[in-house]
Image: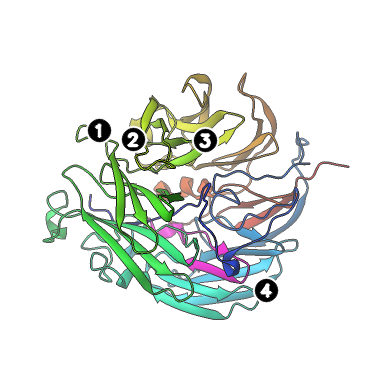
Amino acid sequence: MPIQALLLFVLIGSSAAVAAENSVAKSGNVTDWPHWAGPNSNCTSNETGLLKTWPSEGPPIQFRIAVGTGSNHPSIAENDLCFAQLEEDSLHETVKCVDASTGKEKWSHTYEVPPVYTVGWGELGVRATPTITDKFVYTIGTFGHAFCFERATGKIVWQQNFREQSPYLDGSLKGNGNLEWKGFNGSLIPIGDKIFLFYWQGGNPAIPAWAKTDISDKMQVFAYEALTGKVAWKFEETCAPGSRGPGLVTANGLPLRFQNEDCLVIHGNRDWKILRQADGKQVWKWQCSGPNEAPAWASGGPKPVGPNLYLDELNGWQKSLVECDFTQADPKPKVLWTGNEVHEAVTPPVIVDGHIYGFWVDNREESWALGAKPGKANFSLRCTELMSGKLKWSQPGFKMGLSMSAADGRIYVRSHQTVTLIEANPAAYTEQGKLERVHDLRNTGPSSQKGLLDWNMPVISRGRMYLRTPGEIICYDIRAAK
């Protein structure tokens, strides 16, 4: 199937200097959750002093507000909470900022979009999570409408249509394949003075006759100026046969210092590549998978998990641990283990005390549609030792949609209308609380999509847990009693 997806750049363990106007301060145990996957970009909060167990009725609800459809979790900085939604008419998207302690609206902006049926899985609403910085809020909608707002007022600083930036996007919609699958999924996360976004365009021959074009598979990396939204540079490469660009869905890029320069590590076209942030020049690469390996399409990309240690999906689905010293001119990557059955095509795993907690598809035949049977138990939650790749335990029975986050020795797991609090315990799967029937499956579109709306990971910030459901944002007080 021809697929055009915009990919998320995730900031993890970066030594790149973030400009002052794009920084959000954190202090003590009080942490913000200012962009996708939280303050550390690894689905984990630094907070402590949270409930270790939940009462049978669950933690108390502080507020709940009605929201439109969206696959983005809320972002929180100090007392600002931002999110984006598809309106009921399916012809408009809205970005909102509300009070994080009450849910009261502070500002909003609504804009027109094409009908949702012109993009794959359109009924899932806006995909990308807003990013809150010290002064600004950055957002992008399903069809590439990108905005920078003044955080305090909601005034538009700049707006661009990123769908028109690339000749391989060229403003087209479903019909020739460019946005057929999911549209724009990647959040706008400023790194220094730039925003990096990844694109992949499918060409001949792996597209149906009605979508034939004269272009080959291409991968692109665009750098946009964070203060204007204008293109700073573009890196483009024709993909090797059987390969793809950076992973689809939520692939990762990693900012770091390499040879005394701010650079970006990406995984695409079978390689780890290092691009210079200043001008996009490729300064190093390592072929990490071959033609007989599945392309790293799920959420592949190096994620730092220790000194010179990186998790990635070298064969497209299963985890690998790679040792690589980027302080050296020749980093000499070494694969320590591979083939671990935890993958990110569903949701990113979390790492707590040297162990990986993540999901695996137990029955691909039943779950290939990722939600066609949202009440079906197709997935297991697994705990794996990070350094050895050894499986510690596996707990079956989880249902689509799925997501998780971690804080204070506990893991918050969403699974099809249910939220379970488990102990981060490598010895055994241990539940410490459960919320059932958190929401109903409202009529948001085809049944194949209803189970996906729990992809929004629980957000942990300032003693609260925020859950976005198909129709609400619910705020729970999860502070432990003093």
Separation (CA) of disc 3 from disc 4: 42 Å
Reading the image, the residue beneath label 4 is 106
Q: Residue at x 75, y 48 (%)?
A: 29
The amino acid type, in three-letter code, at marker 2 is Leu
Q: Sequence order check: which comes first, mark 1 or mark 2? A: 1
Q: Sequence order check: which comes first, mark 4 or mark 1? A: 4
Numbered mark located on residue 423 in the image: none
What kind of element bears circle 3? loop
Is 109 on the left-hand or right-hand side of 127? right
Vertical placement of 108 versus 317: above or below?
below
Separation (CA) of disc 4 from disc 1: 49 Å
Q: Position of residue 129 (x, y in %)?
A: 52, 59
Q: Sequence order check: which comes first, mark 1 or mark 3? A: 1
The answer to whether the residue labelled 1 contacts the one labelled 2, judged by CB atoms less than 8 Å apart, is yes
The answer to whether the residue labelled 2 contacts the one labelled 4, judged by CB atoms less than 8 Å apart, is no
Residue 280 is at least partly visible in this image: yes
What kind of element bears circle 1? loop
- Is residue 124 on the magenta stretch? yes
Reading the image, the residue beneath label 2 is 314
Residue 230 position by quadrant: bottom left
Vertical placement of 138 versus 275: above or below?
below
The amino acid type, in three-letter code, at marker 1 is Glu
Reading the image, the residue beneath label 1 is 293
What kind of element bears circle 2? loop
Q: Residue at x 37, y 28 (%)?
A: 335
What kind of element bears circle 4? strand
Reading the image, the residue beneath label 3 is 307
Residue 180 position by quadrant: bottom left
Q: Nearer the viewer, residue 288 or 414?
A: 288
Q: How is the image coloured?
A: rainbow
The amino acid type, in three-letter code, at marker 4 is Lys
Q: Nearer the viewer, residue 339 or 177?
A: 339
